[in-house]
Image (tube, rainbow, N blue to C red):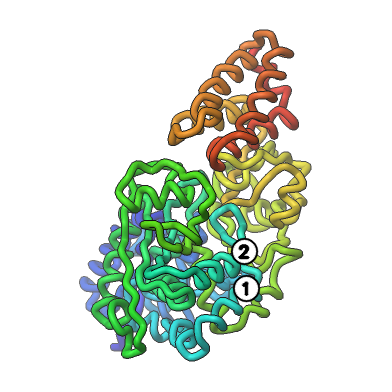
Amino acid sequence: MAVVKIYVPRETTAVSVGADDVALAVARAAKSRGARIEIVRNGSWGACWLEPVVEVQVGDRRIAYGNVAPDDVPGLFDAGLLEGGEHDKRIGPVDEIDYLTSQDRWTFWRVGLTEALSLDDFLAHQGFEALQKAWDIGPDAVIDAVTESGLRGRGGAGFPTGIKWRTVADATADRKYIACNADEGDSGTFSDRMLMEGDPFGLIEALATAGFAVGADKGYIYLRSEYPLTHSILSRAIDTARAAGWLGDDIQDSGFDFDIELHLGAGSYVCGEETAMLESLEGRKGIVRYKPPLPAVEGLFGKPTVVNNVVTLASVANIVNLGGERYAAMGVNRSKGTLAFQLAGNVKRGGLVEKAFGITLRELIEGYGGGTASGRPIKAVQVGGPLGAYLTADQLDTPLDYEAFVEIGAMIGHGGIVVFDDTTNMALQARFAMEFCAIESCGKCTPCRIGSTRGVEVIDRLIAGENRDENYDLLVELCDTMENASLCAMGGMTPYPVRSVLRHFAEDFAEGTQ
């Protein structure tokens, strides 16, 4: 009897709803039946509402079963799981699931497909080909390809990656660094985590390729402490890559030295800001730095440093392999390529969707997300994390494009999309934004530290109906001060959600008086 591969994700979402127990149940059921199987712990495809997803390899296809509980496993085996048998949990062949096949998988193409911690599986799916090609074409050609691609930082600011890399490459210094910002702290975001858990070797290759391009021999991954499974997977992957000669001195006899250190954060939201992250990496309190100098000129330990987030770096391998012009052909205007959008909140089918820029919020939320989980009308959508503006149902046809969002006073940020239905009191959401800033502020600048605290007080008075006109004007003035005078985006962007509520949902403040 041939060995049958059965895939069960080892990924935080899947594990949180029982994937480990399902894998154990599959192993026990196979043993009791004398079936020969191999359990493969892959990443998640991103259809989070279907987790745990179990797949069985039947010939050259993988048949998926969704929302599998441990108690379902005996019945699945009785129904012919190993042959892809019919069952009420059966979804069908993975390559026929429209949610997946209609995406533009550029950065996440290996996530879900491969066994996350198998170096052999990674190498069989173009692993380290970009790094080896980089050695052949040289550093300048790599940076030229990244520049031609139009890739912009996926962490929120949208700064052109090629310009950043070229600045570091041209800098004169005795040492340079790559710093991967994996401190994914925005509400409704999980793309970095899913990529690290599902394709950790891909991130390792990305850091090494960036290091070769700019002349750095050391990379750091700054990982948020709230991701324990990610930490375990990344740690094992780094050790495996180092043992196999893909990290360390003279990688694969190439003459190129590069190693990676995984650094665990301590729960500070503001360390998602690049200079606060660098401070933390250097062993100090995570407080933002004054700029200039920019990190590309004087960053980690005072040396030129490339700071990119996970998805930005992971997009580079295919840019090197397939060419910058191919990436630039996707997207719209100055928003080139793809972004892994994350659907969360009151949405029927939450998950990750990688699509080219230009898709609308409506297409994502209704087409992929299936509308609200409650079945009620959409009232607001927050894009870009807790400091992103709240958009109305009338703005759902806005294309996902950096500049288009700026024009309506919003931002795309890390691509997190949180949906709210018509039962939500938006005045309380505005208050949450100010309270969040007050709690998470590093405290270095007065507009952010004090402004956010005063902002909560002013909003409370507005909700209570006290001196409504005067407090409205005071809140607007406070937002102006925070936006224009804060040292970093923490205080500078807190007014975005507050202003959007004042602009579109002002009536919700009156509800507090009823």
Toward the viewer: 350 or 29?
A: 350
Query: Up-down: is 43 above or below 226?
Result: below
- Place of residue 182 in the rendered image (x, y in percent of width and height, measured from the top left): 42, 56
- Place of residue 181 in the rendered image (x, y in percent of width and height, measured from the top left): 44, 57
Toward the viewer: 290 or 493?
A: 290
Would you say residue 52 is visible in this rendering? yes
- Place of residue 147 in the rendered image (x, y in percent of width and height, measured from the top left): 62, 73
- Mark 1 lies on a secondary structure that is helix
* Dots 2, 1 in contact, CB < 8 A: yes
Tell whether 322 sits left or right of 329.
Answer: left
Disc number at residue 160? 2
* Amino acid under disc 1: Thr
| Disc 2 from disc 1: Cα separation | 8 Å
- Quarter holding the N terminus? bottom left
**Badge 1 density bin: few <14, some 14–19, many ≥20, Cα 10 Å:** many
- Quarter holding the C terminus? top right
Mark nearer the N terminus (2 vs 1): 1
Tell whether 181 sits left or right of 372.
Answer: left
Which of the 4 image quadrants contains residue 161?
A: bottom right
- Mark 2 lies on a secondary structure that is loop
Toward the viewer: 119 or 283?
A: 283
Disc number at residue 60? none
Would you say residue 55 is visible in this rendering? no
Tell whether 281 sits left or right of 62.
Answer: left
Disc number at residue 147? 1
Q: Residue at x 35, y 56 (%)?
A: 15
Q: Residue at x 51, y 28 (%)?
A: 446
Toward the viewer: 156 or 293?
A: 293
- Place of residue 308 in the rendered image (x, y in percent of width and height, measured from the top left): 49, 61
* Amino acid under disc 2: Pro
Tell whether 404 sits left or right of 207.
Answer: right
